[in-house]
Amino acid sequence: MLLVVAGAAYWYLMRPPPAPVEPIKIGFEAPLTGPVAWDGMYMLYGALLAEEIINERGGVLGRPIKIIAEDDESKPEKGAAAVEKLITKDGVVGIVGCIHSSVAFAIIPIIEKYRVPFVITNAWRDELTEMHNPYVFRITSYISYNLGLFADFIKWTGAENIVCYSQADDYSISQQEGIIKKLEEKGIKVKSNMYHEIFATDFTADLTKIKSEVPKVDLLYTGTIGANTALILKQAREMGLKFLYLVTYTGVVLQPDWWEMLGDYGDYTVVMDLYVPGHEFTNLGKEVARRHRERFGVPATASSFCQFDGVLALVAAIEKAGSTKSDDIIKAMEALDIEGGNVKRIKFLMEPTGPKYHQVVPPVFFWQYQKREIKIIHPPDLAEAKFVWPPGNPKA
Amino acid sequence: MGMGLNLIFGMMSIVNFAHGELYMISAYIFYVFSVFMGLNPLLAMLLAAAVSFGIGVMIERTILRPIYRLERMDAIMYSCYVTFGLEPFLENLALFLFGPSYRAPPAVGSGSVSFFGIEYSAARLAASAIGVVVILILFYILRKSVFGRAVRAIVQDRDAAQLMGINVQRMNMIGFGIGIVLTAIAGMLLTPIFMLYPSAGRIPGGKAFAVVIFGGLGSVEGAAIAGVLLGLAETLGAWGFGLGLGKWRDVFGYIIILIVMMFRPKGIRGK
């Protein structure tokens, strides 16, 4: 008897450990180097936080998830290569990420070839969902949605001498052209419509032209994202330009680096944003905001939240489908209705035509730095402070 | 930067593809001294220049030493391979140490200065002035000093210089270090204006090569002249007489280079 017990104990103690559970891999791709690396890094933070929170809650289908990240360097060919590698070498079940629409267009044939769902969290061209590709989903804004908001806001400010100046890429050109058209519909004519090369760092030639405009420019809209958003403003202010700077959301504006780069030049900037710190709509959102600051030492941005919600949606769809098979995930994504981190409800629109297909739109705000503090100024029902023209502005 | 690159090529027949990355690394060293350690920016610049010289010497003594055993063409090819590899190594080292965020090292001069109603960036004016002073000092050293004579002798004929008693290897080491210091000065003056990030050296590095070819391989004076001409061509072209052709800035510079090269294929001061 003793021998039996001893033998059983020996077997129990000496048995091989259980094989580790293979995680479900989710691919992430965004620019992690280059002028837009800030936004890419914040997206990565959102993805890593989603991985952490989801795994704490037991993962999905009894398995943890693992985020595998790749850098597209803001280049379409690099994005396509990164996604091909994620799918074929790393075996990811879905791709979540992407900032540049041009990169997204390069990725779509790859995900189509391998039939892998792709959740876009930061690229805004309408066509990305308008093409009604069954594998493509989006949890962020899109251009035609923004156009009306921008045009309404610009008209609301009372600006009369407007210049539009953005980086020359797919998204920025589409958005800028669209805003100009919407403004013309509202009877507002834009003085100049200009673009700069995406990797440019010296804007003085174009700013000299802007400075020569008569009457003086009172508002400059830019669709430029990343560090160049700060560079344009710095070089403009050094030339004595005092326009109101209207920016499309980009992580750099919320960083301490913004003030390191610009000093007081950064004040009075107005940002169209999808998230404002301190304005979370769900308990999950509040948790994400708190943990983002604790884990990464910086506040979350819209990029972090859109990415978080993207991973959350994909994982929830896997759970709902009970499978990692692509077609099952897609069916589950289309039927999803869950609470998000930034978005109150992640429920994909399924309109038969137009860009509202496989599309979730986060809330949109306009906020302004006033004495270096963030104040929501629009829409009026959420406004915390009145809008202020920068000192020295023709309208001030 | 072009002058530094040409000094290195003229003395050592080394094509330094990592020149732009050394511009960036030197700027990060300046950033560490001035921002992390809180030193006075001018003191930080001097220290960063000294460290950059040391980095140049270290690179020459380790990675580049084998070129002295090689024939000229083999030496050039070897330097291409090695510095081509150094380029991504330095960029990724900076990415690893400092992350992808853009940094703003302190500028010499802040805000703007008004002359006759036109506002200029104080940092740009200071960078231009310091750049001119550095060029003049370098010209003086090359023309008037014993060291400068030795450099010119090596550029003319390395073997003959060695026969005349010049310690070519030691001069090469110092020359490489000085070349890196020149690029470091450019980095410390320009990154406060255009920002500092791991790939900040790519565009200036490319421009330095354009300046070298435009000015004439191995000609430090040619590089100085070419640098000014290239800058003027780009700026005037981008201004476009008020048309705002900023996105075509680089095109104007290369058009000028092509035109000059058609008539002087060896560059402005190339032999």
Image: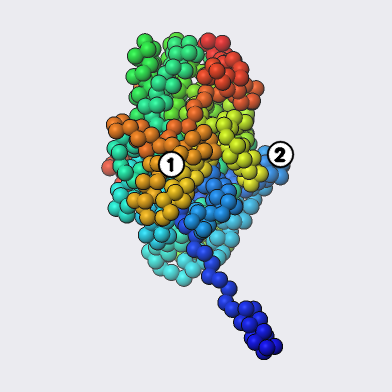
Q: Which residue lies furthest to the front in this view?
A: A1
Q: Nearer the viewer, residue A335 or A387?
A: A335
Give how far across and how far down residue A269 sits, in percent.
55, 24
> Looking at the image, which is closer to me, B46 or A91?
A91
Return the x and y of residue B120 as percentages of the image width and height. 54, 24
| Amino acid type, callout 2 | Asn
In the image, what residue occupies the spot 70% across and 88% down?
A2
Which type of secondary structure does the marked residue at label 2 adopt?
loop
Whether residue B180 is visible here, answered yes or no, is no
| Residue A369 in view here | yes
> Is A385 left, or right, of A114 in this rendering?
right
Left or right of B209: which side holds A382? Answer: right
Is disc 1 in the same subunit as disc 2?
no
Identify the disc placed on residue B226: none
| Total tally of numbered discs in the picture | 2
- Residue nearest the observer in this picture, A308 or B144: A308
* Color style of the picture: rainbow
Mark 1 nearby-residue class (10 Å; few <14, some 14–19, many ≥20): some
Q: In which quarter of the image is residue A104?
A: top left
Disc 2: which residue = B40
Q: Measuring 38% from the left and 41% from the top, which residue is drawn there?
A: A334
SS class, disc 1? loop
The answer for how far apart the CA atoms under marks 1 and 2 are is: 58 Å
Label for residue A336?
Answer: 1
- Residue B82 locus on image (x, y percent): 46, 62
Quadrant housing residue B84:
bottom left
User: What residue lies at 40% left-to-right and 41% top-to-bottom?
Assistant: A335
For label 2, the crowd category at 10 Å Cα-Cα, with few meaning under 14, some 14 to 19 and many 20 or more, is few
